[in-house]
Amino acid sequence: RAKDRGSKSAPNEDSYFIELNSLAAGVCDGVGGNTGSDVASKLAARSFRNYYANLFWNHTTKVLDESIELFKVVHLAIRRESSEFNLGDICTTAVSCVLVPIKYLFSRGHGVLITHLGDSRAYRLERNSLKPLEFLTIDHLASFHGLSEREAAVTQGRMSSGEQPAQSAISGALGYGDEILDPIAQVFGLEKN
């Protein structure tokens, strides 16, 4: 009788959201190795979806500021959930995209507002094109913030000074630490084709 059940895959820590009314979508990637990161990614995706479901653009909307503020609100919601249910350091990276009437930003037409934190990424793929995928976001890695990956990991308490850092230590995630590293929000214009 065989007792080996084969390899077990780790629980899925990724979540996504799609909000058709506001044409918003995104991915939340629970930071691996942290117990409960699936909770963080689900909570973030649900929070983003709920926000975008009630979104109404008008001439007073400061879309870049509001998008960054939304990430900060989600960060605090994850921190509260973690504290309330004693989940420890649960966190997730995230990227969100929403169609924005550019008249509220620049002139006329539409653009895509992309906001992200951590190493969740957005790419551009042109239809009927042989061009490679174009990176639209830059990861929040320790090396981009003037720290070596070792310094960032030790500073954030993720490893002792004698351990080796991970290949790409992220320096920001929703729910990690008391302060959130500033998310990056950018608008990309849409071409007619």
Image: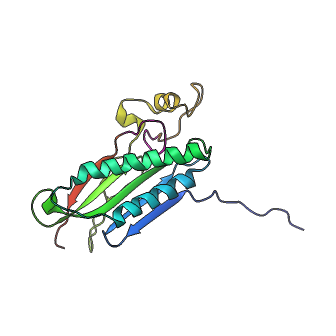
Q: Is residue 125 above or below residue 176?
A: below
Q: Is residue 41 above or below residue 54?
A: above
Res 159 quadrant in image: top right
Q: Residue furthest right?
A: 1
Across and down, in percent, residue 59 comes to 15, 59
- Total count of labels: 0
**Between 163 and 61, which is closer to the camera in this rendering?**
61
Give the quadrant of the C terminus: bottom left
The residue that appears at 53% across and 35% down in the rendered structure is: 165
In the foreground, 77 or 162: 77
Residue at the spot 46% in from the left edge and 31% down from the top edge: 152
Give the percent coordinates (x, y) of residue 124: 29, 62
Frontmost residue, 11 versus 18: 18
**Magenta stretch in the rendered image:** 170-181
Magenta segment main secondary structure = loop
**Residue at image point 48% right, 39% down:** 169
Let me know if residue 91 appears in the view: no
Task: Report the side of 187 relative to 73 (left or right).
Answer: left
User: In this orientation, which residue lies closer to the viewer: 54 or 31?
Assistant: 54
Left/right of residue 11 with respect to residue 168 in the rendered view = right
Residue 143 seen in render: yes
Name the residue located 24 percent from the left edge and 51 percent from the top edge: 64
Place residue 131 in its image quadrant.
bottom left
Residue 145 percent location from the top left of the image: 36, 33
> Is residue 172 located in the magenta-colored stretch of the structure?
yes
Q: Give above or below for 191 relative to 149.
A: below
The location of residue 185, given as percent across then percent down, is 28, 50
